[in-house]
């Protein structure tokens, strides 16, 4: 019998451990089935990575009655939405279709949270499409902590029932593999160093960088493929593993007119103040400047910056707190925006590279933090103002919104991961507007239809400037489907991707990497595992037999997953 002390020793600060310890005796006995002796925990499904895809996968598996262990390297589940602090980038039809019932439930939960807990105006309370931050990038710009609360609530019931164990602040350190199957994954508590071995019939890699793929020997790709390999119009002439989209350390920034919140001069400020990105096509000047490369035209662009809210510009782009939705006298600040701009994209090195140690990757993260702090200091002291002056001293960090001491997001916003070598790989030729027009000879086109669709998504092929000297690639794409073949590794049988690490290319990753698509990928992966356990067949067998696949797709549709698009206009 696993004791209370033993569970505490093994699980450290795992958030969802609390219901285990508070459970009645019968429930404790049921929960003990998840915890085997000798530092091992067994489940039906182990999900490594608690980001958007990981949470969606857990929900899908839990709905089908599976016992799930979910691990997360930070102390917040939610990934892009929470620990990375990025409001959801979504397509223009998200309020009507093009996602799933569970994702729409998450979005409704965010709005309900504000309406239930915040002192809003009558107009805001009555708005069924409330955008809490009023930001332009999304119809649902909001604070990271709200996403954390909503996602935690979605999982809480399953934790209380003993179906879910969440191990926060645990990272994978190794995998045990037998032939083409993963037998176990060991995770380490980042605070104590204690390790736990997790076993299950199936594992999902929902890590931000595809960390399980090399550990488990799963064939995968890093960086940019060559045009000869993929046939994509925007692929490079030669493969370049070092060409990976920049990552960004985001931060929330409030404006307090008339106050001085200037931070200490960052240690690397002189470096970043003079830094000029070496990119092709060229960047228009210094990185710390209001002028930057327009993603589509590749010409110099300046949206302007005015935290008083006049004009659109960078301040309103990702604003997450809109003062106008609150009742008079409740909030006296000028609002809060989330800084995830071209000016704090980190270009000096990738987080994944052959031979790169974890210490070297962490050094890049530290420098990226210095870049973000330098950007804030530059805005406080040197940024040109519309009135001819310089600097906005009233800008201040909001560490309470991201749960950190330094006011920066807990984790870097990662745009590109290792990607599996899959049974089927989605390329620009399947989803790019111009590529499809060229292939079909027609002006009015749709994305390549996939018979094995398990979800849908829509976003431009949006690649930020990359390490290795490549500037933006931002081209029109078509509303697309997510093929099951892209979730199946070419060899390994029981480890599946659950986020950006599916079978896409460096180019097509640009439209498969955003929040609602990652949710759909994770949901499909979690549902697939549950289906495979129910029919006692492996994932590859589901796709290999049309009747089996149709049965699985019917389950997805019954659970409210959109697997096809109506006729739509290209973005």
Image (spheres, rainbow, N blue to C red):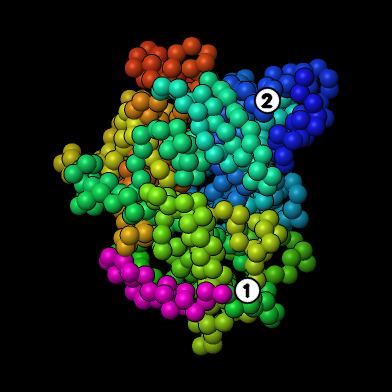
Residue situated in front as seen by the camera: 518 or 419: 419
Q: Is residue 486 left or right of residue 519?
A: left
Would you place residue 161 above or below residue 430 in this image?
above
| Most distant residue in the bottom direction | 388
Q: Is residue 34 magenta?
A: no
x then y, percent, for residue 31: 73, 22
Q: Nearer the viewer, residue 149 or 203?
A: 203
| Residue that badge 1 annotates | 395
Q: Quadrant of residue 504?
A: top left
The tag earlier along the polypeptide, 2 or 1, is: 2
- Left or right: 224, with 218 as reference point: left
Q: Callout 2 environment at 10 Å: few (<14), some (14 to 19), or many (20+)?
A: few
Residue at left offset 65%, top offset 26%: 41
Query: Looking at the picture, how far across and down is residue 565, in whole percent?
Result: 38, 34
Identify the residue at horizontal 40%, vertical 17% (top origin): 542
User: SS for tag 1?
Assistant: strand
Part of the protein shown in magenta: 267-291
Q: Residues within 10 Å of mark 1 (few under 14, many from 20)?
A: many
Which residue, given by chain and number where applicable, does mark 2 sit on? 38
Does the image show residue 245? yes
Side of 196 relative to 422 (left or right): right
**Residue 280 magenta-highlighted:** yes
């Amino acid at each position: 019998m696993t004791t209370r002390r033993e569970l505490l020793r093994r699980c450290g600060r795992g958030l969802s451990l609390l219901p285990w310890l508070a459970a009645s005796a019968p429930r404790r006995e049921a929960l003990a089935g998840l915890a085997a002796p000798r530092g091992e925990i067994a489940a039906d499904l182990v999900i490594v990575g608690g980001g958007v895809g990981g949470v969606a996968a857990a929900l899908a598996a839990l709905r089908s009655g599976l016992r799930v262990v979910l691990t997360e390297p930070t102390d917040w589940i939610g990934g892009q939405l929470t620990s990375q602090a990025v409001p959801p980038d979504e397509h223009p039809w998200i309020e009507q279709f093009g996602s799933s019932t569970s994702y729409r439930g998450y979005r409704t939960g965010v709005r309900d949270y504000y309406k239930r807990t915040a002192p809003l105006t009558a107009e805001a309370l009555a708005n069924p499409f409330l955008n809490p931050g009023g930001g332009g990038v999304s119809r649902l710009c909001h604070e990271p902590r709200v996403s954390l609360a909503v996602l935690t609530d979605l999982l809480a019931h399953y934790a209380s029932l003993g179906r879910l164990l969440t191990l926060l602040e645990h990272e994978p350190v190794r995998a045990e593999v037998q032939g083409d199957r993963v037998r176990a994954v060991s995770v380490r508590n980042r605070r104590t160093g204690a390790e736990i071995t997790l076993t299950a019939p199936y594992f999902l890699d929902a890590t931000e960088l595809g960390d399980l793929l090399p550990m488990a020997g799963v064939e995968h790709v890093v960086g940019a493929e060559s045009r000869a390999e993929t046939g994509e119009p925007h692929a490079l002439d030669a493969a370049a593993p070092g060409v990976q989209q920049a990552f960004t350390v985001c931060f929330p920034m409030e404006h307090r007119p008339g106050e001085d919140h200037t931070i200490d001069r960052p240690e690397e400020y002189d470096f970043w103040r003079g830094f000029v990105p070496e990119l092709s096509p060229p960047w228009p000047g210094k990185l710390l400047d209001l002028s930057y490369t327009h993603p589509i035209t590749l010409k110099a662009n300046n949206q302007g910056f005015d935290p008083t809210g006049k004009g659109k510009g960078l301040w309103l782009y990702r604003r997450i707190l809109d003062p106008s939705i609150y009742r008079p006298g409740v909030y006296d600040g000028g609002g809060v925006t989330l800084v995830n701009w071209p000016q704090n994209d980190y270009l000096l090195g990738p987080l994944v590279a052959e031979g790169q140690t974890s210490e070297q990757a962490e050094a890049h993260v530290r420098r990226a933090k210095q870049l973000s702090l330098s950007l804030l200091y530059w805005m406080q002291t040197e940024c040109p103002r519309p009135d001819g002056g310089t600097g906005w001293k009233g800008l201040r960090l909001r560490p309470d919104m991201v749960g950190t001491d330094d006011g920066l997001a807990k984790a870097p916003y990662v745009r590109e991961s290792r990607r599996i070598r899959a049974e089927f790989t989605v390329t620009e030729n399947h989803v790019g507007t111009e590529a499809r027009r060229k292939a079909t000879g027609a002006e009015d086109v749709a994305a390549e239809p996939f018979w094995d669709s398990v979800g849908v998504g829509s976003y431009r092929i949006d690649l930020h400037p990359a390490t290795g000297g490549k500037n933006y690639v931002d081209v029109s794409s078509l509303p697309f489907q997510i093929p099951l073949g892209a979730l199946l590794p070419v060899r390994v049988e029981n480890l599946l991707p659950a986020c950006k690490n599916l079978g896409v290319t460096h180019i097509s990753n640009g439209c498969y990497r955003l929040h609602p698509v990652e949710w759909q990928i994770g949901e499909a992966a979690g549902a697939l595992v549950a289906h495979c356990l129910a029919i006692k067949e492996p994932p590859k067998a589901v796709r290999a037999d049309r009747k089996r696949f149709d049965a699985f797709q019917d389950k997805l549709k019954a659970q409210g997953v959109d697997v096809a698009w109506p006729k739509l206009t290209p973005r």
